[in-house]
Amino acid sequence: MRIDVLTLFPEAFSGPLQASILGRALAGGIAEVQLHNIRDWATDKHSIVDDYAYGGGPGMVMKPEPLAAAIEDVRGRVEPRGRTVLLTPQGRVLNQGVIDELAAEQRLVLVCGHYEGVDERVREHLVDDEISIGDYVLSGGEIAALVLIDAVVRRQPGTLGSEESLLEESHSDGLLEYPQYTRPAEFRGWRVPDILLSGNHGEIARWRREQRIVRTAKRRPDLLDAVALSDEERRIAREATDNK
Ligand code: ADE
């Protein structure tokens, strides 16, 4: 997969793109991220990329010319043109379903908005999709793009997270993850649940499934409607919500 990022602040990406699982995936060629500075497409001698809003009001708006030129130029460099995604608090809200949809693309062109937003004509005519990472406002789309890149790249075959799709990762099947423990079996008098030390894999699997249901019922009951549960599991969920 190839991801092109159009931004006014390419330096915001260097640290996160090099760290941990994401860094390893990119270094190993599982995905490629190309950063482009929108300012490079400005044509005046001061490289101006923003201007006052028509109609007045506070804040600046990203000018259409450099941004449009950047999108079209970068998009045309390789096939396929892929999907052009604007990061904006007005977009559809990101979740694992949206991530899996984007992860299936061979190519993404991510556009990071800044200032009070981008000129509406660019959004309307040159952008295929608009994504928000949540109902709050960041100072720009860069951190949102990083969130999207991390979640999409770890779904690529060969990255940790891709093989786990059928396992019990939070949100992979609509349920939250079960609680995790490692050694020691007792820490400050707090014990690991006995069942996990029992070696009985069938019982452990059953306990973990129940923990996932209880956890989701208590913390994120909104998620449960979309999950297929047996009658017994529905009862467990109801009890967990009642005893919260
Ligand atoms: N830019 C500013 N806020 C944002 C958000 N919540 N999601 C995506 N891009 C943004």
Image: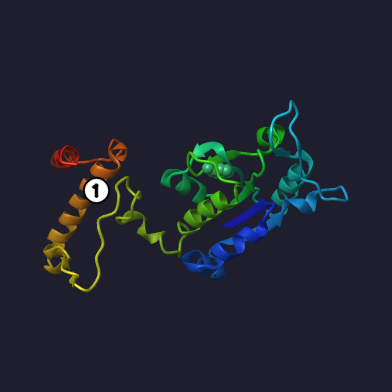
Please identify the quadrant where the N terminus is shown. bottom right
Left or right for 237, reference 157: left
Image-based side of 19 in relation to 212, left or right: right
Q: Nearer the viewer, residue 65 or 191?
A: 191
Q: How many marks?
A: 1
Give percent across and percent down for residue 200.
Answer: 12, 65
- Residue 185: name its quadrant: bottom left
Residue at 55% over, 67% down: 18
Give the quadrant of ligand 1. Answer: top right
Q: Quadrant of residue 11?
A: bottom right
Q: Is residue 184 left or right of residue 81?
A: left
Quadrant where the C terminus lies? top left
Q: Residue at x 45, y 56 (%)?
A: 155
Determine whether 5 is above or below 231 in the image. Answer: below
Most distant residue in the right direction: 45
Furthest residue toward bottom: 184
Say what amino acid the circle numbered 1 marks.
Arg
Q: Position of residue 103 (x, y in %)?
A: 50, 51
Residue 165, how many percent across, how many down?
A: 36, 55
Q: Look at 51% across and 37% down and name the residue there.
A: 92
Can you give x and y, in whole percent of width and height, for residue 131 in the image? Answer: 54, 41
Q: How is the image coloured?
A: rainbow
Which one is in front, 173 or 136?
136
Ligand 1 closer than 8 Å to label 1 CB: no
Read off the residue under disc 1.
215
The image quarter containing residue 204 is bottom left
- Crowding near pointer 1: few (<14 within 10 Å), some, many (20+)? many
Q: In the rendered view, would you say 88 is above or below 208?
A: above
Secondary structure at badge 1 equals: helix
